Image: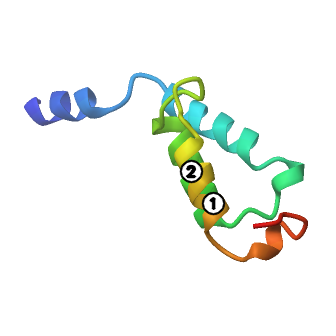
Amino acid sequence: MKVIVEITQELPMSSSCCERGFSSMKRMKSDWRSCLSNEMLSFLLHISVHGPPAQQFNAEKAVTKWWSSGCKTRRPQFQD
């Protein structure tokens, strides 16, 4: 009997966590972004679920890193 009680205490009371995950995935992988790889989708969902709210995120560091990395062909009209 003790085992049954312990098992039932471990079961979730609702499926709301799963539903939020599916809703996030539906927003991420829309018709416009249907070619996302599974890895990128996983990264985006992780940020969406566990990351800071968009209002608190400081994008300056990420933009600076993106701007200075990779090929310069992203900005062909830009003069260094």
Query: Which residue is disc 2 drawn over?
Result: 62
Badge 2, how many Cα within 10 Å: few under 14, some, many 20+? few
Query: Which residue is disc 1 drawn over?
Result: 66
Q: Secondary structure beneath disc 2?
A: helix
Q: Amino acid at mark 1?
A: Trp
| Residue 55, picture quadrant | top right
Marks 2/1: CA–CA distance: 6 Å
Q: Is residue 40 left or right of residue 7?
A: right
Q: Position of residue 73 (x, y in %)?
A: 82, 75
Instruction: Give the residue displayed 68% in from the left and 67% down from the top.
Output: 37
* Residue 70 against residue 7 in the figure, above or below: below
* Residue 80 against residue 47 in the figure, above or below: below
Q: Position of residue 78 (x, y in %)?
A: 84, 63
Q: Amino acid at mark 2?
A: Ala
Tag 2–tag 1 contact (CB < 8 Å) = yes
Instruction: Give the residue displayed 46% in from the left and 24% down from the top.
Output: 14
The quarter of the rendered structure image containing the N terminus is top left
